[in-house]
Amino acid sequence: MATATTPSPAAGRTSRRGRPGGSRPARIDAAFGMVFAAPAVLGVTAFGLIPFGYVIWYSLHDWNPLIGQFHWVGAANFQRLVTDPVVWGSLWTTLLFAGLLMVLNVTLALALAVLLDQRLAGTGAFRAVFFSPVVVSTVAWVLIWNYLVASNGGINGALAAIGIDGPNWLRDPAWALVTVVVIQVFKSVGMNMVLFLAALQTVPGELKEAARLDGARPGRVFRSITLPIITPTILLVVMITTIGAMDVFVPIQILTEGGPGRSTTVISYLLYRTAFEQQDFGYASAIGVLMFLVLFALAALQWGTRKKWVHDEV
Amino acid sequence: MKSDLLTRRVAAATPVRPVPARRRRATTRRRRGLASKVALYGLLLVLSVPFLYPTIWMVFAAFKPVDEIFATPPRLLPTEWTLHGVERIFTVTPFAQQYVNSLYLATVIAIGSIVVGALGGYAFARIRFPGAGKVFLVLMTGMMIPGEVTIIPIFRWVAQLGLMDSHVPLIVVPIFGPGCIVSVFIFRQFFLSLPDELEEAGRLDGLGRFGLFTRIAFPLSGPAVAAVAIMKFLYAFNMYFEPLVFLRSPELFPVGLGLTQYQDNYGEPLYNTQIGATALTVIPVLIVFLFAQRQFVEGLTRSGLKG
């Protein structure tokens, strides 16, 4: 499955019948190729690459559209950035959010996948249940949970019934971030569960059986056979989940608006506020550049360390 | 029949189809004890609660009077059923219009993404053209750029073109922007798995490149079309950030953004109305999901795999 995720453009070329290059039909064909690819390529250029170039350009300016101000300030935005405790705090919050979400999501997804991988009637129905929040819109999911985690909502009501005085989940700085993470995990864990389930089903039964005959207990079989075989999927899931966690916006906007204090102001939310509420577009662009660098660094880190823990990586 | 065989081979080559658990485990002959079975079911049931309860709660809470929504101890069923919340769904905000907006945006975005994705995927999978490999790599890096970052210049262009408070940026950017890369990947992956013989046969019948695509390759790409359609439809139904930035008029909002606007004339939130409206957006999607589970799971996991 991991091979499916590293698209090698060359594969396309070798699988086709080669035609003598440079001939008229080949040139016409190449023209077709370029025309077919054009909408996607031009679109990504126009709405992805060029805007990113502009963001870098804007980040060197002081720009407030409300008062029609746009002038060159050089690296001033970045100087402000590195000394801004709000930015550093939000960077820390983002990493905490992404790290917590990734660990909880991957652990729960793997646990659910292992449970559903048992030979048991009705696992299909449970699979549907665990997957269903993935198809529900984030806004709807978050709105409903907003009621359930309210200080006088269902969760605290249930806790009160067993004698626990639950906190005000979203208004307590100690709990707000964790609460948002947990709500988001329930929303999206089904996707990773399905990916793990597919991976678990590639583990050869004979291998597990052999280990069992050698006297290995189930936990040991899982650790020594199953886990190493599915590490490529784990890497993939960790990467998708971390990168996905970086641009969380809807849950923050609806549940906490970055609060209480700044305890849930992740970097994408800080960017939104700086740009569209404070109209400080130059500084917001600098934050955008920083956000991209963090994202890139995280992906590179995970990709770079894969040899250490991914089984059979070539 | 020959064509049957070909379709089956195509189907077999389609990546990542989870094998049902029943068909495997031929080697595991151990029978599970009753106790461990009960324990497993118990565990699965407990784990289901946070996934299932919010939806069930939502359906009943829509029929509760406002003060019962936060009653202690909490109850799932209303003690007093009321339509007071539900009947205001369509009058407090232009909910019906917003629903239509979402359906319309989702349909246009899904169709546009299928066209762009299929053309691009076909080009990268089956046509040799100069620079294809490099361009493909550039596309991949484009996927790394978060939409929250690029929205700043796009916001500026949209404002300069006078397209604020219109659906144009909400349609054009998702179809052609970096969001299309996933669709291109899904189609490319699919077209790579098509046997060469199919196109050879088409070529012998005198089909040109365009004919090969429209008459042979695209009609066979049903699974990829389904995957992209489901993914983009849900994306459009989910849209929140972009409409928040580009739209001002509630009549133009998609449902998602509209759901957050339920307040009475004094700015007090209308809890049961909001919950009812949320249920109306969630339930249809869940029903479709129940009937097309396999397509949903496959389509969305492929998008997760980026092709």
Image (tube, rainbow, N blue to C red):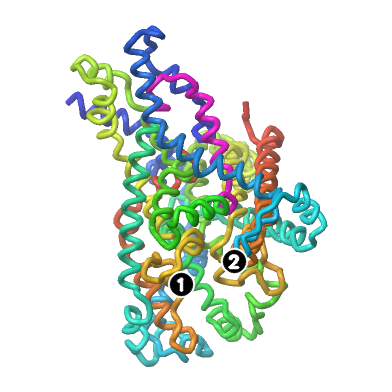
Residue B235 visible? The answer is: no
Q: What element carries label 1?
A: helix
Q: Mark 2 points at which residue?
A: A252
Q: Which residue is drawn at 66% across and 84% down?
A: A165
Specify start and end residues of the magenta stretch as a single range.
B122-150
Question: Whole-percent x and y of residue A148?
Answer: 53, 77
Q: Distance between the residues labelled 1 and 2?
A: 22 Å
Specify the amino acid type for callout 2: Ile
Identify which residue, A119 or B228, lies in the foreground: B228
Q: Which residue is drawn at 68% across and 49% down?
A: A59
Specify the amino acid type for callout 1: Tyr
Q: Is the magenta stretch mostly helix, strand or loop?
A: helix
The chain containing the residue under callout 2 comes to: A
Identify which residue, A248 or B30, lies in the foreground: A248
Picture layout, residue B47 above or below residue B268: above
Picture layout, residue A304 above or below residue B56: above
Q: Residue at x 34, y 18 (%)?
A: A29
* A194 magenta-colored: no
For this view, does B51 lie left or right of residue A253?
Answer: left
Q: Name the residue under label 1.
A: B53
Identify which residue, B159 or B290, lies in the foreground: B159
Identify which residue, B99 or A219, lies in the foreground: B99
Q: Dot 2, crowdedness within 10 Å: few (<14), some or many (≥20)?
A: many
* B134 magenta-colored: yes
Asked which quadrant contains residue A98, the reply is bottom right
* Between marks 1 and 2 in the image, the one whose residue lies nearer the viewer: 2
